[in-house]
Image: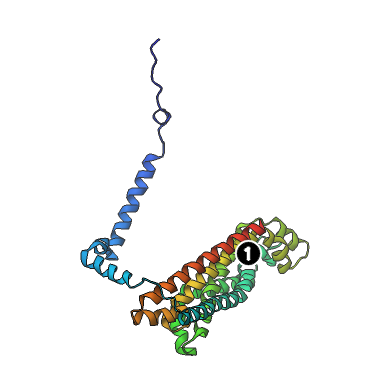
Amino acid sequence: MQNIPAVPYAARHPDPAWRGRVTYTVLGLLLLWPMLVASEFKPAVLFDWQSLSATGRFLAGFLPPAHSPEFLAMLLRETWQTIAIATAGLSLALLGAIPATLIVTERLSISRLGRRRMGVLPAAVRQLVRWLLVLLRSVPELVWALLLVRIVGLGPTAGVLAIALTYCGMLGKVYAEILESSEAHASASLLTNGGGRLAALFYGALPEAAPELLSYTVYRWECAIRGSVVMGFVGAGGLGQRMDESMKMLAGGEVASMLLVFVLLVAAADLFSRLLRRRLA
């Protein structure tokens, strides 16, 4: 008998959703193109000979990175201040985000027990707190820092308060969403049997959502470190302020050393997050 070549599976069973995928891809490109035009994005400028030569001269100034004892001592001191700004700001944000989470999380609402609906006053308070969280996270920490520098003056205080305000809104929103999407049986049982909201949070909702909450908190701490560096450019202290001074003096070696420290800080935060998740798992 003559061997008939087998028909490939893809030919026998064509993808039934290819038309939809192609259509959505084309629509996405059609929507993206006007945005690229409006943003005046011109990637060809990066490959212009004048731009490439300027980039080469700029990067050449980064070598070798600064490593004098006096500079390294200053770098260590400013790195510690940057970590302190981020940690203090995140700690203050948690002081506001945790109570806000208790208020806006509907699964921890006692007024819903037996009725499936909240009372008018609890619903109004919950909505006001939600609007407050929206306001806090709508203003970037850099803008808060610009405002606070003019109120409290130059220095780390403005950076700490800016991180606290913005991250309070972010943490409160995301914590509430994580708790809302987690298993509700344990917390609902505690509330039904007379337990308080704190008991329902600590013994019902947290054991289920702890890894995700902790991972997001460490990620926000990593973002706070980066944010504190950026806020240093407007006078909020830390490594960012020193980098701004080095860039103005065209000290590329000092800038390169500071950039290496940024990379190490983010890598350390990522390692810390993975270790915590393994412990909780």
Which residue does the numbered mark 1 point to in the structure image? Answer: 106
Q: How many marks?
A: 1
Location of residue 46 with respect to 30 vertically, above or below:
below
Instruction: Specify the farthest residue to the left.
Output: 49
Near-viewer residue (39 or 27): 39
Near-viewer residue (117 or 262): 262
Q: Is residue 114 visible?
A: no
Q: Residue 260, percent across and down?
A: 45, 69
Near-viewer residue (140 or 130): 140
- Residue sitting at 38 percent across and 40 percent down? 18
Q: Residues within 10 Å of mark 1 (few under 14, many from 20)?
A: some
Split into 4 quadrants, where in the image is the C terminus? bottom right
Q: Residue 263, percent across and down?
A: 47, 67
Quarter holding residue 184? bottom right
Q: Residue 204, percent across and down?
A: 71, 61
SS state under label 1: helix
